[in-house]
Image: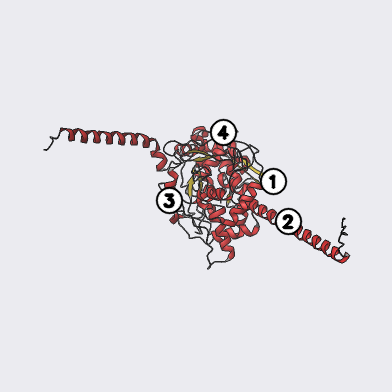
């Protein structure tokens, strides 16, 4: 005998309730998922902005390579060329296998995933101040939004002993401050934002602060100006003569956004790169915050008699000298200026809407002529809002002209300084050669060739001393 049980039937109301619950659950899940996606998208967008502010692309993208962040850019240092690494999420050549912790350690401590030390040409000494939240945003951007590129850039090969990367661990112990940025409660939110940008993301001190014997920043002279290879990063403290204290806030914002302020300055070299790749893309609020902070820094005097941008005036010398006999030997600078410079900068040096004035110009009005020399040798290139600004390179080995020797560059520099700028400054052919070859070598780089021989001599002397001690001991009579 089989018993048949009738299937249970749920009341219609109850079925509808269950359906409504399931629908609500799906909606909640979908809404939560949408919120997560929005939050992640916002994090990536923030990371993209932070990477721009930190100027990552400028150093990690080789010129004309078309491979963003794939490395290979040669950073000229006093110790040799340091090639930037691939920071795309490539698993073979980039950082695709990095965890967020690995990423943070590389960015803030200068130690890669495999434990090898980075050189401080990568400004981890500034990035050490980055917050955990910003590190997370940067990591999300690089891992999820940057295209992975399998490209192995050229390896850095510095001379011994600098080739021993492990030595950087001792350098870090001495000079790396690992403290995160701490807002100053006595200052405004705008000031603190500017300080965070300047000290961490934009790493202004990396170029504008002098270095000590061991190539670490001299904190007591922060932002007071420093040589960076062939170029000179000027004093940007609040000093009204030597620094930027005499600039208006509007002028500083304009300079940081465009690299040009008529009658004051124009960006070239590393600063032009920073403005092109980073600062022109910052928000107006962030640029103003930077200015608020810089205008409040400790003023440091470095010996200028008058503000660099206030020196010089228009000159009729080019018109007066043109065509006169006897200048082939005595007026070489005039001939070069007339043939190569006057067409753009005008015969009186006033410039025009496209080319800057040669007087009231920080490159010609200061006590240090390196930026004038470097601009003549290497030219100038920056693109702001899609509009290029260009000056050809006139150095002897320049691809554009291949015609000015060290003496030629010195002569035209002295002509420009004498007629438009600080005539008390004189440029020699030796000065031009120094700039052409990468600038003044620091003591550490100068003694590098002698380190290996010195170590060898020390080892030989130590071996001789040990041998003499052993021989002497053997000659001593044994005591019963």
Label 1 and label 4: CA atoms lie apart by 25 Å
- Above or below — where is 188 with respect to 279? below
Which residue shows up at 15% across the image and 32% down it? 475
Disc assigned to residue 386: 1
Residue 353, visible in the rendered structure: no
Label 2 and label 4: CA atoms lie apart by 57 Å
Near-viewer residue (170 or 276):
170
The number of numbered discs placed on residues in the rendered structure image is: 4
Local SS, label 2: helix
**Which circle's residue, 2 or 3, is located before the other in the chain?**
2
- Above or below — where is 429 with respect to 129? above
Position of the N terminus by quadrant: bottom right
Local SS, label 1: loop
**Figure quadrant of residue 446:** top left
Image coordinates for residue 193, horizontal then vertical, percent: 58, 60
Disc assigned to residue 167: none
Local SS, label 4: loop
Residue 172, visible in the rendered structure: yes
Whether pointer 3 and pointer 1 mark residues with C-beta atoms closer than 8 Å, the reply is no
For label 3, the residue is: 173
Local SS, label 3: helix
Image coordinates for residue 116, horizontal then vertical, percent: 49, 42
36 left or right, relative to 328 = right
Image coordinates for residue 95, horizontal then vertical, percent: 59, 43
**Which circle's residue, 1 or 2, is located before the other in the chain?**
2
Nearer to us of marks 1 and 2 is 2
């Amino acid at each position: 005998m089989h018993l048949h049980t009738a299937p249970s039937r749920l009341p219609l109301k109850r079925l509808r309730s269950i359906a409504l619950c399931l629908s609500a659950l799906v909606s909640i899940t979908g809404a939560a998922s949408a919120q997560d996606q929005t939050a992640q998208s916002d994090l990536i967008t923030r990371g993209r902005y932070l990477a721009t502010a930190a100027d990552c692309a400028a150093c990690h993208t080789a010129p004309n390579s078309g491979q963003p962040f794939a490395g290979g850019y040669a950073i000229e240092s006093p110790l040799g060329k340091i090639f930037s690494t691939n920071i795309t999420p490539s698993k073979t050549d980039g950082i695709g296998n990095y965890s967020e912790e690995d990423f943070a350690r590389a960015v803030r401590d200068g130690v890669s995933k495999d434990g090898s030390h980075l050189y401080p040409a990568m400004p981890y000494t500034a990035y050490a101040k980055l917050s955990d939240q910003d590190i997370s945003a940067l990591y999300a951007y690089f891992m999820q939004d940057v295209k992975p590129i399998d490209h192995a850039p050229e390896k850095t090969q510095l001379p011994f002993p600098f080739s021993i990367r492990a030595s950087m661990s001792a350098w870090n112990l001495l000079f790396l401050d690992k403290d995160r940025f701490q807002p100053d409660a006595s200052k405004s939110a705008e000031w603190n934002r500017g300080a965070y940008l300047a000290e961490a993301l934009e790493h202004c001190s990396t170029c504008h602060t002098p270095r000590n014997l061991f190539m670490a920043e001299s904190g007591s002279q922060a932002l007071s100006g420093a040589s960076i290879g062939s170029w000179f990063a000027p004093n940007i403290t609040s000093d009204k003569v030597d620094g930027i204290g005499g600039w208006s806030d509007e002028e500083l914002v304009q300079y940081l956004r465009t690299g040009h302020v008529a009658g004051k300055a124009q960006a070239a070299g590393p600063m032009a790169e920073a403005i092109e790749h980073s600062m022109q893309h910052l928000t107006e609020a962030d640029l103003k915050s930077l200015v608020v902070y810089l205008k409040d820094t400790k003023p440091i005097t470095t010996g200028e008699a008058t503000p660099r941008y206030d020196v010089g005036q228009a000159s009729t010398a080019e018109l007066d000298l043109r065509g006169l006999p006897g200048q082939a030997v005595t007026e070489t600078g005039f001939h070069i200026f007339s043939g190569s410079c006057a067409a753009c900068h005008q015969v009186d040096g006033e410039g025009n809407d496209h080319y800057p004035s040669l007087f009231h110009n920080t490159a010609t009005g200061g006590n240090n002529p390196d930026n004038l020399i470097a601009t003549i040798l290497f030219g100038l290139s920056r693109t702001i809002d899609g509009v290029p600004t260009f000056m050809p390179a006139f150095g002897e080995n320049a691809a554009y002209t291949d015609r000015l020797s060290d003496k030629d560059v010195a002569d035209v520099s002295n002509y420009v300084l004498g007629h438009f700028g600080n005539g008390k400054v004189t440029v020699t052919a030796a000065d031009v050669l120094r700039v052409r070859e990468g600038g003044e070598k620091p003591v550490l780089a100068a003694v590098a060739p002698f380190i290996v021989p010195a170590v060898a001599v020390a080892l030989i002397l130590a071996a001789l001393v040990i041998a003499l001690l052993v021989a002497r001991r053997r000659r001593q009579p044994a005591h019963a």
